[in-house]
Amino acid sequence: RRVPSGTIYQRPPDSKALRGQRRHRSHTSISIPAAMSTCFYASTTAGAQSLDLRVCGSSLTTTAEGTTETLATLSELDALITVTDILWILVCGILVFWMQAGFAMLESGSVRRKNVNNILFKNLMDASIGAICFWLLGYSFAFGNAKYIYQDTGKDNRFIGAGNWALQNFNNDFDYHSFFFQWAFAGAAATIVSGSVAERCRLEAYFVYTIVLTTFIYPIVVHWVWSSTGWLSAFYTDSDGNRYLKENGVIDFAGSGVVHMVGGFAGLMGAIAIGPRRELLSDDPRVRASVKGSSDLLCALGVSILWMGWYGFNAGSTLGAGQGVIGQTASAEPALTYINIAAKVAVTTTISAAMGAITTMIYSRVVLGNYKLTLCLNGVLAGLVSITAPCSVVEPWAAMMIGIIGSFVYIMASNTVKACGIDDPLDAFAVHGACGVWGVLSVGIFATQSNISRTFGFDNNAVQSGNQFRNQLIGVIAIASWTSVTSGIIFYGLKFAGLLRVSEEEEKLGLDASEHGIQVLEGKSVEMKAKSEQPV
């Protein structure tokens, strides 16, 4: 999805690595066929501290003491690279899915005890309903036949994909990892919304929205930005090699816009449509304070899991580990591969998240007069969301700045939403929507030409000329508009049909009781008798 593939070059080890396995044999000669494809580095002198020999070929053989031994053929190396890439994507996909546990902990700790069962149930259904919907239609709308616009794309176009329904084109075992990884992202986008409408949304309404989001709303944005035919995509190319948006298209490496803006803006529309919780309409400060979450411990554990899972989210978006050529390959200087980009992504992700936490800590102490844990936890998430789009195209110092600015974007957005009377229990819009916008725009400010060239293969001055910022701004407007309009139609449609919000009595009693038959008595959850079991 991110980095152009190409010839594979083996990076030479340093002098310390030379003392290990790669130098345990003494070679007197090397036989190389005419086809030059794969390169290895070695030393012709025993005990040398530097490399002075570069060997390239599609089949490498060694001759030692009159015996010829084949080290590897190009097909064998390609097979190993393929296995490595698939394994990398599967592991990172599992990490992204593990974020569902983080969301579940964070959300259950942020709502009152009488609604914990309900919010956990919504998280479970997000993943389950999303998996079936994304399998049947969503993945096809997102990627279609996975061809470029100048090829025979069938009915795929710049707006939507159309093909490979229910993965019917996956007639081998080499493509399923792609669906698995993308489904984990779709589940994350859907889960964001549950926090915005927590403690007052009917389950049936939430199911309807989850179906629409994972089948249509989210996949369309994926198609625009990440497919090879989408009009915003950095991977769109016509027969002349041009993109629909001049030069680089929209760069969103791991989804500040695609995932987090979609979830955040959808959550905002849901919160506006459903209205605030009843307690927040009271003039009594004690009543308003009663909406405080049930467990800061669960919130802290949830954010820790999310931070961990984010490494799969961002670093895994290289969509490979063993292959890829980035930068110059004709020179003696070794080329970078996917895993090199993933390592840098892990560093920039860490720095931005850490600065988000530190900035909100300082703000909390200076402005609020104390150290507020929940604010700092959201500061971590603000830094993570902000760095998700630019993580591969910025330097570590820029990641620090992105995290600092992202934390202030979160604080300002949260205060603005509250001032407008919008009840967003988990600050989902402020964290995911507003910081998602900042993350996408930050590419046009902090990305460097060399980093874009190494990651995407585009060697131009789009950032310096301002064209990249223009592209990013177009992407932000398009994603925000699409998500707000489509989500608004769904949420307000459910509201006018009387299906969106539970009754005042049910809300007061708690959704655990009204939706799941579980009531909190003396701090413990007790299963209520079914209506058929209750005495007449």
Image (cartoon, rainbow, N blue to C red):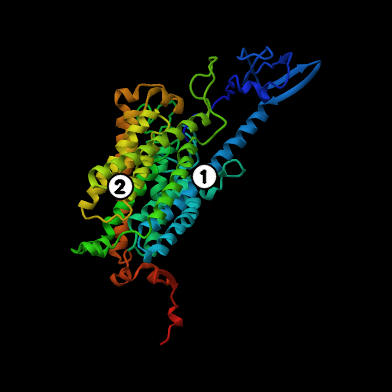
- Asked whether, in this view, residue 3 is left or right of residue 504, the answer is right
Q: Compared with residue 255, is residue 214 higher up or lower down, i.e. above or below? A: below
- Residue at 46% x, 25% y is 454
Which quadrant of the figure has residue 347? top left
Element under label 1? Answer: helix
**Residues at badges 1 and 2 in contact (C-beta under 8 Å)?**
no
Which quadrant of the figure has residue 69? top right
Q: Kindly identify the amino acid type of the residue bearing the numbered disc 2.
A: Tyr
Residue that badge 2 annotates:
371
Point out residue 431 in the picture as x, y percentages from the top left corner.
Answer: 33, 46
Q: Residue furthest bottom?
A: 536
Q: Residue furthest right?
A: 66
Q: Kindly identify the amino acid type of the residue bearing the numbered disc 1.
A: Gly
Q: Nearer the viewer, mark 1 or mark 2?
A: 2
Point out residue 367 in the picture as x, y percentages from the top left corner.
Answer: 23, 44
Q: Compared with residue 321, is residue 493 higher up or lower down, i.e. above or below? A: below
- Asked whether, in this view, residue 341 is left or right of residue 367, the answer is right
Point out residue 399 in the picture as x, y percentages from the top left corner.
Answer: 37, 32
- Asked whether, in this view, residue 36 is left or right of residue 111, the answer is right
Which quadrant of the figure has residue 362? top left
Q: Compared with residue 423, is residue 315 higher up or lower down, i.e. above or below? A: above
Please tell me the numbered disc located at residue 93. Answer: 1
Say which of 126 and 383 sits in front: 383
Point out residue 173 in the picture as x, y percentages from the top left corner.
Answer: 62, 43
Element under label 2? Answer: loop
CA gap, disc 1 and disc 2: 35 Å
- Residue at 31% x, 23% y is 464
